[in-house]
């Protein structure tokens, strides 16, 4: 599949099917999205899982390269309105790449307490990892160039799309 | 393979072959072992890789369950005698299990600087992960009970063996 032809809704349906199948009967699972694309995915997954515990993390402050990248004006505070201590958490990101964002998100969660388990779901895994992180659930893997970025969009009706942008 | 029959030397040879094949031509790779079993493995891997940068981390202080487990009297200080900033690092553990030790070791390395890349090698992956961590190199996977523990030993001639102990 060419990256420009990625059907985000079809990929989301695959991811949702994997997650529902695996977490059926797991007990309460809290769903935490990484802002912004992961938060949209997490919202839909939490509804489908019937999870009453969901939240968001914005790791812009925690990323290890803040000094290089600078901070966007749009940093949102993390919202974790449930008890992290002992929780089983599904962390959700749109695109898994170096693993640095995942590490930052995990460390953010540990700031709130010690979870029993953190699993990771990503819509797309683009490889080129820089840390030994792996997703438990992933809908698609794709190879991109260093100057390409996959961006998830949500339209006014809540439908997802993916574009490849040059950075 | 029954866990009680694990041949640690044969597994080490497999792990070494994977690592040498993958890292051939990667440039300088620093090798960091997680104390104690991972440090023994790291010593041998560093010699075979011809790496002049090697070190040890003891994550007993950093593990998120220090309060539950208490601290052993044998905690060693971490030794990272190379520049972590920008380094490519092979982190080495004997047994990969929940991923909590790996997370602690990664965070320890980031306390020293921001590595370009951290890869993970483990002699045995016993599954039952509680964090989304994966090894880049692993010689063997095995399923163990919650009260079983795989322990790596090194004899006076430097030969490895593995035993299953009940905890």
Image (cartoon, coloured by chain):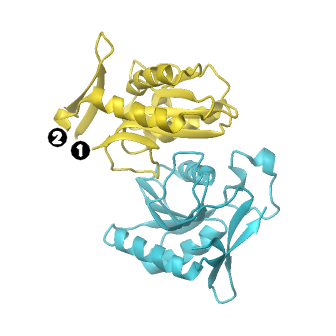
Chain colours: A yellow, B cyan
Relative side of B149 to A52, left or right: right
Task: Identify the element where label 1 is drawn.
Answer: loop
Q: Is tag 2's residue or tag 1's residue first in the polypeptide sequence? A: 2
Q: Which mark is residue A144?
A: 1
On-image quarter of the N terminus of chain B: bottom right
| In this view, B127 is above or below A62 | below
- Expressed as whole percent of the image width and height from the top left, the position of residue B160 reads 62, 81
- Cα separation, mark 2 vs mark 1, equals 10 Å
Q: Which mark is residue A99?
A: none
Q: Residue at x 68, y 37 (%)?
A: A114
- Expressed as whole percent of the image width and height from the top left, the position of residue B24 reads 33, 72
Please give the chain letter of the residue carrying mark 1.
A
Single out the residue that lies furthest toward the bottom: B157
Asked if residue A94 shows in the view, the reply is: no
- Expressed as whole percent of the image width and height from the top left, the position of residue A76 reads 47, 19
Single out the residue that lies furthest toward the top: A156
Q: Are marks 2 and 1 in contact (CB under 8 Å)?
A: no
Q: How many marks?
A: 2
Kindly identify which residue carries mark 2.
Answer: A2
| In this view, B161 is above or below A132 | below
Is label 2 on the same chain as label 1? yes
Which one is in front, A133 or A87?
A: A87
Relative side of B159 to B113, left or right: right
- Expressed as whole percent of the image width and height from the top left, the position of residue A123 reads 36, 35
Which one is in front, B126 or A23?
A: A23
Residue A118, image quadrant: top right
For label 1, count other residues whose C-alpha is less than 10 Å away and answer few (under 14), some (14-19) or many (20+).
some
Task: Identify the element where label 2 is drawn.
Answer: loop
On-image quarter of the C terminus of chain B: bottom right
Q: Residue at x 61, y 73 (%)?
A: B2
């Amino acid at each position: 599949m060419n990256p420009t032809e990625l059907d985000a809704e079809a990929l989301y349906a695959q991811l949702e099917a994997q997650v529902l199948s695996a977490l059926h009967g797991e007990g309460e699972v809290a769903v935490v999205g990484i802002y912004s694309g992961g938060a949209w995915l997490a919202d839909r997954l939490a509804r489908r899982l019937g999870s009453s515990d969901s939240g968001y993390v914005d790791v812009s402050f925690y990323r290890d390269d803040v000094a290089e990248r600078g901070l966007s004006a749009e940093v949102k505070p993390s919202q974790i309105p449930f008890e992290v201590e002992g929780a089983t958490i599904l962390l959700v990101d749109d695109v898994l790449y170096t693993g640095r964002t995942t590490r930052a998100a995990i460390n953010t969660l540990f700031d709130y307490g010690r979870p029993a388990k953190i699993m990771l779901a990503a819509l797309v895994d683009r490889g080129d990892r820089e840390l030994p992180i792996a997703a438990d659930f992933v809908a698609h893997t794709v190879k991109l160039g260093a100057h390409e970025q996959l961006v998830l969009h949500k339209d006014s009706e809540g439908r997802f799309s993916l574009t490849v942008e040059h950075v």
